[in-house]
């Protein structure tokens, strides 16, 4: 779908043969669908003579995410295309804010289970308590400020998800135990990513979200 949309947008009336080789398992929580969607958009752009803007590429790749997950979103696509850390302030209209990457690294611990993003979304609560929303907003703001100021303490204090993680973590055996062990080992924090299938153990850290 991404390639077809790119060809249509470019007015290109010939086909493209595509071979996909990647080592991210579907349903792994590592952004498998985003990798394919972003790769297709960027690859098509190069073949077509680099005619699309960054926003164009994100919009095209979002078509692939909707096909894979049922929802158009750019949170995984955008760092794939731009590299580094990105804040998606809005997708209607698209508003991307690159954020400085501090000298950190991420450790991924994968339990080798598979859950589709579309399925994982189904178990989320339809309503959120105001007190939880306020706490979540504060943590998001704190995380962004921590990245921008290279404040590791603030990053660690802000790595708390009180809305999504408590629900999705039930899909992962020993989630709470592993997270606690990561923090005991010196991690700034930890949590689920994308589909709650892996843990981010921010230990000494060089953050590479690409």
Image (cartoon, grey):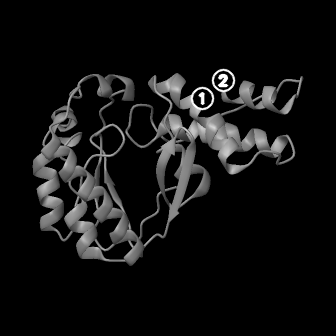
Q: Secondary structure at mark 1?
A: helix
Dot 2: within a 10 Å radius of its alpha carbon, few (fewer than 14), some, or many (20 or more) residues?
some
The answer to which of 15 and 7 lies nearer the viewer is 7
Label placed on residue 63: 1
Q: Position of residue 84 (x, y in %)?
A: 52, 62
- Which tag, 1 or 2, sits closer to the chain's start? 2
Tell me where residue 31 appears, x and y as whole percent. 46, 41
Does 198 sit above or below residue 12?
below
Q: CA distance from mark 1 to mark 2?
A: 7 Å
> In the figure, residue 2 lies in which quadrant?
top right
Point out residue 135 in the picture as x, y percentages from the top left corner. Answer: 18, 52
Residue bearing the label numbered 2? 1
Identify the residue shown where x is 82% and y is 48%. Answer: 50
Tell me the residue at 18%/61% (across/down). 182
10 Å neighbourhood of mark 1: few (<14), some, or many (≥20)?
Answer: many
- Looking at the image, is mark 1 or mark 2 nearer the viewer? 1
Number of numbered discs: 2
Res. 188 visible in picture: no
Seen in the image, is 46 located left or right of residue 177? right
Residue 204: quadrant of the picture: bottom left
Foreground of the two, 66 or 115: 66
Residue 145, position as x, y percentages in the image? 35, 69
């Amino acid at each position: 779908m991404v390639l077809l949309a790119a060809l249509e947008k470019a007015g290109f009336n010939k086909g493209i043969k595509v071979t996909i080789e990647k080592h991210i398992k579907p349903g792994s929580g590592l952004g498998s669908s985003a990798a394919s969607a972003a790769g297709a958009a960027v690859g098509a752009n190069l073949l077509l003579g680099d005619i699309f803007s960054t926003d164009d590429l994100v919009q095209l790749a979002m078509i692939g995410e909707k096909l894979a997950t049922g929802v158009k979103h750019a949170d995984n696509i955008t760092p794939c295309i731009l590299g580094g850390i990105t804040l998606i302030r809005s997708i209607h209209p698209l508003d991307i804010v690159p954020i400085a990457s501090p000298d950190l690294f991420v450790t991924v611990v994968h339990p080798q289970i598979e859950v589709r993003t579309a399925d994982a979304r189904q178990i989320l609560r339809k309503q959120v308590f105001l007190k939880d929303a306020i706490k979540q907003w504060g943590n998001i703001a704190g995380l962004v400020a921590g990245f921008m100021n290279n404040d590791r303490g603030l990053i660690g204090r802000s790595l708390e998800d009180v809305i999504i993680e408590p629900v999705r973590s039930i899909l992962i055996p020993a989630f709470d135990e592993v997270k606690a062990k990561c923090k005991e080992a010196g991690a700034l924090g930890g949590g689920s990513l994308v589909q709650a299938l892996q843990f981010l153990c921010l230990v000494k850290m060089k953050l590479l979200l690409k």
